[in-house]
Image (cartoon, helix red, strand yellow):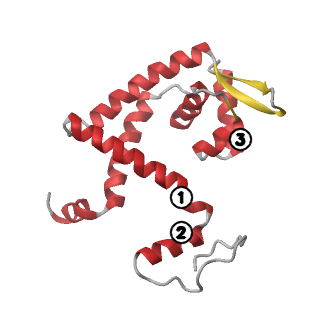
Amino acid sequence: MTGATADLSEDDLGWMLGVVFRAYVKAAERALDGIPGGPRGYQVLAAAVREPVRNQGAIAADLGIDRTVLTYLIDDLEGRGLVLRRPDPADRRSRLVCATDEGRAVWRQRRQALRHVESHLLGGLDPADAETFRTLLQHVACVAQRRDPLTDLCEAVAEARSIDGEEAPGGPRAEGSTDVTPP
């Protein structure tokens, strides 16, 4: 590599993640063509396939999708006969989202198509390195999901500053504060 690209690719995690993400999204959108909501709709369908069956609120939280947006995605998937809502026996106000037989078949087909996308994307690695990459990425993703810095931006900034050796101005945020202005 030459010039600015070489400088970016050597140590800029954001650039590297961006390149891989864009390549994945472009190929995944083609693989998921026809699923209502595209990749997000597929994620909802995948959640509906899993056991135990969960309600809309749990799916929204797991996928990081606004509940209103999720409702529209489920409406569209339900309209195509891929999922259905059924009352939650534990809470009549809640609806469980279940995949239909057709939804399960579509999910299996699209999951296979995404496996091909993943194989193509990781094709430059030998199989052992590709497996190691997937394992490490899964670990990083799970840790990031647990930390979810957007739930407390001030705490995330303070943590980042302490990692960088800086003292966060004003110390830790007061418990229960809803102020999202970084310290």
Distance of mark 1 from mark 2, alpha carbons? 9 Å
Q: Give the SS element for disc 2.
A: helix
Q: For this rendering, which residue is in front, 163 or 113? A: 163
Q: Amino acid at mark 3?
A: Gly
Q: Where is mark 2, residue-wise?
A: 156
Residue visible at 68% across and 22% down in the picture: 79
Could you say which disc has been placed on residue 57 in the image? 3
Q: Point out the tag, 2 or 3, that comes first from the N-terminus.
A: 3
Residue sitting nearer the eye, 84 or 161: 161
In the displayed structure, 145 sits above or below 171; it is above
Query: Considering the image in quadrants, where does the C terminus appear?
Result: bottom right
Type of the residue with mark 2: Ala
Pointer 1: residues within 10 angstroms few (<14), some, or many (20+)? few
Residue at the limit of the structure toward the right, as seen here: 92
Residue type, numbered disc 1:
Arg
**Do the numbered discs 1 and 2 sit on residues whose CB atoms are within 8 Å?**
yes
